Image (cartoon, rainbow, N blue to C red):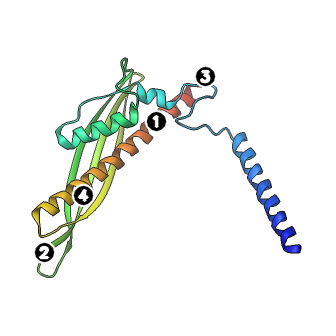
Amino acid sequence: MRSFQRKMDRRRVSLLALAGGLLTLAGCGFRPVYGTGGADGGVNAMEDLEATKINVIEDREGQVLHNLLLDRFNPKGRPTKSKYSLSVKLDYTTVDRGTQIDATVTRAELTVTAQAKLVAFDEVKLFTSRAVSTYSLSTSDYAAEVAKQNALDRSLVLVADDLRIQIATFFEKRRLLKG
């Protein structure tokens, strides 16, 4: 009987702690970046992201990043009236990392860097995002090329996610500072 009583006491303490945590979070002024509501009548960073035109990015990798950014900024399709403009310059480098005794390279590191320029509110804001991926090099040329392409695609996804977070944070901070 005592073990049952202890379990019930632990559950009560856990529920009280959870309720206290929720009350604390509600009173601190927490607002989700992508949510609706708040002092500004429901305008949020997602609406600003949706009103951003993403300019064409050069090369195949640039087009992949362009499509990833479109999916993250404009899930409902391209904006009909864009208020902001985003230009991105993409660069990537590969460095050999793993070498064997006979100087055969077995591992490579791919670094993707994106420099984004957002024109918003009559000002230009610069953002930089970088992602590093590694991949194995095979004796087969095809397998090595597929591994490199996979590493590049993974890095582009990380860069797109990072740029979305940085730009959404910029919009939200600007909104909070303006009041």
Mark 4 residue type: Leu
Asked if labels 2 and 1 touch by Cβ distance under 8 angstroms, the answer is no
| 4, 175: nearer the viewer | 4
Which residue in the rendered view is the most extreme toward the bottom?
A: 101
Asked if labels 4 and 1 touch by Cβ distance under 8 angstroms, the answer is no
- In whole angstroms, how far apart are the C-alphas of marks 1 and 3? 18 Å
Say which residue label 3 marks. Answer: 41
Q: Earlier in the sequence, mark 4 or mark 2?
A: 2
Residue 10 lies, in percent from the top left, at: 80, 64
Residue displayed at 37% across by 20% down? 82
Element under disc 1: helix
Residue 128 lies, in percent from the top left, at: 34, 44
Image-quadrant location for residue 114: top left
Give the vertical position of 34 relative to 94 (above or below).
Answer: above
Say which residue label 2 marks. Answer: 104
Residue 175 lies, in percent from the top left, at: 53, 28
- In whole angstroms, how far apart are the C-alphas of marks 1 and 2? 44 Å
Asked if labels 2 and 4 touch by Cβ distance under 8 angstroms, the answer is no
- In whole angstroms, how far apart are the C-alphas of marks 2 and 3? 61 Å
Element under disc 3: loop
Residue displayed at 21% across by 60% down? 147
- In whole angstroms, how far apart are the C-alphas of marks 4 and 2? 18 Å
Element under disc 4: strand
Say which residue label 4 marks. Answer: 110
Tag 3: Cα neighbours inside 10 Å, few (<14), some, or many (≥20)? few
- In whole angstroms, how far apart are the C-alphas of marks 1 and 4? 27 Å
Mark 1 residue type: Ala
Asked if labels 3 and 1 touch by Cβ distance under 8 angstroms, the answer is no
Give residue 168's mark: 1
Q: Earlier in the sequence, mark 2 or mark 3?
A: 3
Element under disc 2: loop
